[in-house]
Amino acid sequence: MTETPSGIQAEQRNELMALLQARSVADLRSIARAWGWPLKGTAKNDLAQQLTNHLTDAPRMRAVYDRLSPTEAALLQWHNILAHTAEPTGLVAALSYVTQRQISTAEYSKALETLQERGLLFTTLAQALAAPAVFSVWLPPLTLPWLRPKEPPAARPTFSIRDLNTTVYQLISRIESEHPLAARSASSMAAANLGSAIRPFTARPGLLSRDTLVAWGYATQPDRNIARFFLEQLVLGQIIKIAGAAPNARLTVDEAARTRWEMTPPDQRVMHLRAWWIGGRRPDYRTTALWNELDLAIAAVTGGYTLRHNLPWADTFTASTPIDRLRQWLAGLLLRLDSAWLEFEGFIQLIRHLRPALLTTEEVGKWQWYRDGRVLEPTTMDWETWRTTNGRLVEAFLTGPAQWLGLVEISYQGQRPTAFRVQSELPAEEFHLPTDMLQFAPPDTLVLKNVWQAGALHALLRELAVEERRGRERVHYRLNAPVFRDSLMRGLTLDALIARFAAAGASLPAEAIARLRDWEQRAGNFRLHEGVGVIEFGADMTPEEVQAIVRIGGDWLYQVAPRCLVALDAERVPELLVNLRQRGYTPQVIS
């Protein structure tokens, strides 16, 4: 579903290697000399590889970091975050703000030059200056001690792995059983009430209509927003698909993707949802944009402000790109912070200093705030105006998706958020299966409750049965001898499977055990094949010719009578018949 941490780190190492290879041999040797590292050989590739090893050696690089000046250390930590700050004086002012220390332009320029010379900042293919992402393995987390509240906040528990999995599983089950009409077209050119010079942006319904969500039990606006958000992520994860064209497009569930989701541990499901939401490192990763943080924020904007896109022709996805970029940037900042509590309003002020123009991207236009028919420039807005407009978007990001996915924990006074902290680890939770989780239905069916906790049981049932039908409440599996035999051939035993079911929290019913025990005892004595093909030859065929045909077919053909063959792989029979007819034979297919 998503890349593993080791896979991402390998990719980041390769990125660093490419940046080093773009430097001259003299530069590479200069970097090594600056840190006192020996290099062997003369080939650039070998030198770059050695430097990559040094620069990703966490203990070594933490010692290097400790040798940097305060300005160099702060610049290395914050440089990628500051990439969206207006240049040139804005960068110096932003770094001074986050460090709460006055930094001169000369001091900043000197630190920038030193970091480049010593292989800690690089010019990327996009001609931008950046610290390689792989440095995150040794860079310390960002700290903002001046934003810490004076009094310890009281957190309101709002996230649990159980609640998230329950919500997502209910949505999947509803869609799988009802195939509801999609509220929007899947077309990439579908206009979704974009803001333009004529039409201000208003909140969109998402993938399902309000009436459908209310009928499904999402009675309040906050509940509907959560459902809309998770629907978007399930489409991004390709678990839910949009089938057909408007106005008859419907939401469906991809069976293979749903199966993989069921077999994923509950905590890892949360991590997959986070990855789909953030969108990785590629803005084009997102495949739909029918509801996002902009829809969540716009309802809270008051005072006569409106939001419009400066390109009236922009389609849904083009106009959503600035939101995707902002999301990746904000998430990247959060994931670099330590876990200390921070003042909520102080953090929003920090964002204003780092990236005042939140919704501007050079290549795909920008969103603009209006009041009384006049465009408001974000870099010159006063604090009250910026907080009422752009600040609402930052607030929606934190109190919405970041909180729903457990990325942040928020403290409230009444309904007002006052502080938050990043949750570096998911909370530890125990999950217990409902009673009567797995039952036997004669003559040969196992009935499993269709709940989110059943992931491990789905995987175990597929070792001995095939899914026959699925409803919102229950999934029916039929015991299957060939499937169970394949499990036995891989080295599993019935006793081992019984133990695994018990460890997963559900006992395998006695009736099923009896049937499986009989199959296990008979395994190796004989096999029952279903769906075989039978080929019969006429009296003019000699036994030697029939044996020759067996050799032509291979080990999936068995001779059961002098002039009769059984094909265990019936799908290969047509190919064999063509081959035989080309050789002049006239086989007759019986079944």
Image: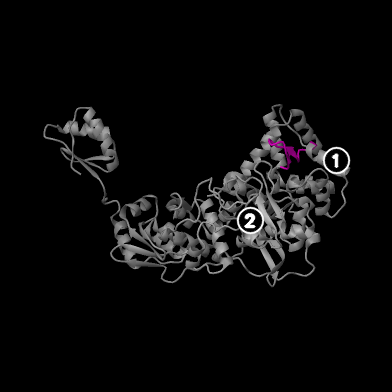
Residue occupying the point 83% across, 45% down: 89
Location of mark 2 (residue): 294
Residue 42, percent from left and from top: 71, 26
Q: Which mark is residue 252?
A: none
Mark 2, mark 1: which one is toward the viewer? 2
Q: In this picture, which residue range is highlighted in magenta?
A: 117-131
Residue 284: tell me if it is visible: yes
User: Alpha-carbon distance for marks 2 and 1?
Assistant: 40 Å
Residue 120 lies within the magenta run: yes
Image quarter where the C terminus lies is: top left
Three-letter amino acid code of the residue under disc 2: Leu
The residue lying furthest to the left in this view is 539
Three-letter amino acid code of the residue under disc 1: Lys
Give the vertical position of 37 relative to 227 (above or below). above
Q: Nearer the viewer, residue 365 or 153?
A: 365
Residue 258, percent from left and from top: 46, 55
65 left or right of 450?
Answer: right
Residue 67: tell me if it is visible: no
What secondary structure is the magenta-colored segment mainly?
loop
Sequence-first tag of 2 and 1: 1
Residue 121 lies within the magenta run: yes
Secondary structure category for the residue under label 1? helix
Q: Nearer the viewer, residue 117 or 481?
A: 117
Location of mark 1 (residue): 110
